[in-house]
Amino acid sequence: MTISGTSENIEQKNTADLCIKVENLHLYYGQFHALKGINMEIPEHEITALIGPSGCGKSTFLKTLNRMNDLEEGVRIEGKVTLNGTDIYRDMDAIELRKRVGMVFQQPNPFPKSVYENVAYGPRINGINRKSELDEIVERSLRQAAIWDELKDRLYKSALGLSGGQQQRLCIARTLAVEPEVILMDEPTSALDPISTSRIEDLAMDLKKDYTIVIVTHNMQQASRISDNTAFFLLGELIEYNKTEKLFSIPADKRTEDYITGRFG
Amino acid sequence: MSNMAADGGTVQGKTGTAKDREKALRMYKFRKEYLGRGVVTACGLFIIILTVAIGVFLIIRGTGTFTKFHHSVAEFLFSSNWSPVDSATGSGGGVGAAVYIVGSLLTCGLALLFAAPCAIGAAVFMTEIAPKWGEKLFQPAIEIFVGIPSVVYGWIGLTVLVPSIRDVFHARMGGYSVLAAGIVLAVMIFPTITTVAADAIRSVPDYYRKGAYGLGSTRWQVIYRIVLPASKTGILTGVILGLARAFGEALAVAMVIGKTRAFPTSILSPTNNLTAAIAADMGNSANGGEANMALWSMALLLFLISMFFIALIHFIENRSAAALKA
Ligand SMILES: Nc1ncnc2c1ncn2[C@@H]1O[C@H](COP(=O)(O)OP(=O)(O)OP(=O)(O)O)[C@@H](O)[C@H]1O
Ligand SMILES: [Mg+2]
């Protein structure tokens, strides 16, 4: 991973509720130019949806926000991403960043441990070992993820025995236990049935009181149902970014219109 | 196939030809399907029969000490009086194999103590820390290690290790010792454990690692909190396979252990073990005599130990599979 580009550190929050600011972000997988000059401001305590056809770079963009791209080889990033004013690539440690910007993946991926240990994982790596404290965090996180009642009697059973929807909400609880500021979700419901999907959607809307949420989705209805802002990506470019009602009712760009009306993608 | 059927339709009248074709088709199917399956089944059956036959043979031979010569199992296991009568008919000697058993346990335990941590460390290194290096250099190197015959290990132990132990620790018996045997065995089982453990680590799905990194884990935390626990069954299998190999190894151990029939007083003193004792005396004991039978009993014991290890591996694997489901 190499970083280059402009590095002015006179960065302040423009508006009080700005959370993430992306400036002229380019990303290359080797020779392949996957993100082309993205500029985007993600407001605090709102849900921002990323839509676009397969391969347009939604996941890639999402991963630049918590530096999961660092784990891949041959990735080169230019430009600047700031979290509450701090440059996350130059002035922040990736490990620290990921504690503040959590991630929920497309496939539910609970660890092969008990429900309890899954949720306690984050606090444990942060040095919390007191049983009473962990108990409290586990219960609070599971409650926040609206899954406490379902799981309170099987806390010590393997998480792999849960249904896909339960696993995904457990993964959200696991992320919440670290008390991040931002939660990134990469198509969190694409592997789930409609009922589990609507539960996760309700949960996301509930969580935005306390967290900033960025969600990738293939599902236009989902984006319009739950998000406040929507960004439309195409071939590595951010084509249009606007309030969700606006983007879906009066898209400014022809390509956005084509996409949301299902003419391609 | 569809061609065949269509042809069959057009040649309705000539029943002879149609029948011939059907027959040819059946033959073809037979050759393709059943012949292959038959050969494979025969091979499988042969292996099973061979294994059972060896087991039965060992049981018949190995129990002679207790049935024909009326020694007790307790004497065999716990007595150190090894003085079986070596003639076709004579009896009344002692068949206590405790020295050999203790020798085997000590050398293998020591080998495991040396090898397991290094091997697991090496497996982590070649899979998690430097996978590119691991594949290009480490893996081939370890495969070569596996292929080296045990006599070579023994010889190197004899020429390098034994004199070193003598010089460094001023050991009596010139360095022939439990320690030398343990080290030689450790070197021999190291590749086995490393290979199996590395496979187990590689089979941990990447989405576990991603999940852990996503929560702000360092690489070390991912390794020891996620990857190692998720692969512990496989790693344990590797350790047990290594242990089984150590128990079965005769030649290399025989060359450095000193072969004295006494309990070791420290890891620097010489002793003997089951395999070395069998290998040393099997050829020149009178067939069917007390000494001969006692050696067979030791062979049976080794067989049972390896059975036990295999059963243990299955038990551990079943239990962890069940634990994941529960
Ligand atoms: N590790 C990688 N190495 C090389 N190219 C990659 C890598 N990851 C993604 N790409 C390429 O980058 C482009 C964007 O991929 P990305 O996964 O971000 O798309 P996406 O919008 O999330 O698609 P989907 O909707 O299918 O998940 C694709 O063309 C993909 O092939
Ligand atoms: Mg994607």
Image (tube, rainbow, N blue to C red):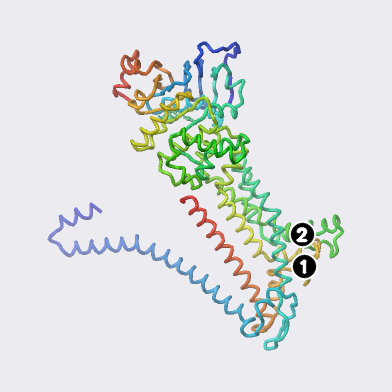
Front position among marks 1 and 2 = 1
Image location (x, y in percent) of residue B117 = 67, 50
Circles 1 and 2 in contact, beta carbons < 8 Å: no
Q: Which chain carries label 2?
A: B
Image location (x, y in percent) of residue B179 = 77, 59
- Going 49% across and 48% down the picture, which residue do you hit? A157
Q: In this view, does A154 lie to the left or right of B119?
A: left
Tell which of A56 and A218 is nearer to you: A218
Tell which of A10 and A228 is nearer to you: A228
Question: Quarter of the picture for ligand 2?
Answer: top left
- The residue identified by callout 1 is B271
Looking at this view, name the residue that lies furthest to the bottom.
B89
Above or below, B177 relative to B300: above
> Do pointers 1 and 2 mark residues of a single chain?
yes
Point out the tag, 1 or 2, that comes first from the N-terminus: 2
Question: Could you tell me how far apart the alpha carbons at marks 1 and 2 are, in whole angstroms?
Answer: 11 Å
Looking at the rendered structure, the kind of residue marked 1 is Thr
Looking at the rendered structure, the kind of residue marked 2 is Ala
Quadrant where the N terminus of chain B is found in the figure: bottom left
Image location (x, y in percent) of residue B248 = 64, 65
Q: Mark 1 lies on which chain?
A: B
Question: Is residue A107 visible to us here?
Answer: no
Q: Is residue A89 left or right of residue B26?
A: right
Tag 1, which secondary structure? loop
Image location (x, y in percent) of residue A199 = 38, 34
Q: Residues within 10 Å of mark 1 (few under 14, many from 20)?
A: many
- Going 43% across and 35% down the picture, which residue do you hit? A146
- Going 44% across and 21% down the picture, which residue do you hit? A46
Tag 2, which secondary structure? helix
State the mark number for residue B180: 2
Q: In this view, does B2 lie to the left or right of B117?
A: left
